Image (cartoon, grey):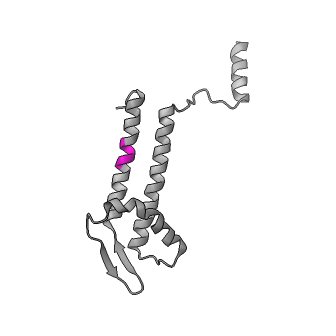
Amino acid sequence: MEKDTRETVTTRENNVNPAKRDATGSQTIAYLIYFLFGALEILLVFRFVLKLLGASLSSGFVSSIYDISRIFILPFEGIFRTGTTQGAETTAVFEPATLVAIIVYAVLAWGIVKLISIFSGERQAS
């Protein structure tokens, strides 16, 4: 009985949760891929909303979002027409290329993670 007590005390002193498992190498890579593609998705959503609301290009934040995200939108430009609506002060732009990019990059991230899990030999969850 003393042995169990000492192990419990040692575990509590080291702040180690015995139920916690460390991520495998492939899981860590999957988390990193989801994080990077998630950041890209957020950037593209910002671009879409700013264009849709007719945000002013004179704002540094808006122009930097457009500049950074432009490279990720280029492969999808021209698939659909861009719609514009002239407002009282701004022009709202509906940019379908951004929506297509958001979908494609989400599917691409999922596919890369699945491919990594296949090559790592981990069992697939149903």
In this rendering, the answer to whether 17 lies above or below 58 is above
Instruction: Left or right? Give the position of 49 relative to 3.
Output: left
Instruction: Left or right? Give the position of 103 relative to 65.
Output: left
* Residue at the limit of the structure toward the left, as seen here: 80
Instruction: State how many labels appear.
Output: 0
* Residue 86 part of the magenta-drawn span: no
- Residue at (54% x, 73% y) in the render: 60
In this rendering, the answer to whether 45 lies above or below 104 is below
Q: Nearer the viewer, residue 52 or 29?
A: 29
* Residue at the limit of the structure toward the bottom, as seen here: 88
User: Would residue 86 be visible to someone looking at this image?
Assistant: yes
In the rendering, at what x and y percent does residue 29 appear? 49, 39
In this rendering, the answer to whether 62 lies above or below 42 is below
In this rendering, the answer to whether 92 lies above or below 67 is below
In the rendering, at what x and y percent does residue 94 appear? 33, 71
Q: Which quarter of the figure has residue 97? A: bottom left
Quarter in which the N terminus is drawn? top right
| Residue stretch rendered in magenta on the structure | 107-111
- Residue at (42% x, 64% y) in the render: 70
* Residue 109 part of the magenta-drawn span: yes
- Residue at (50% x, 43% y) in the render: 32
User: Would residue 122 be visible to someone looking at this image?
Assistant: no
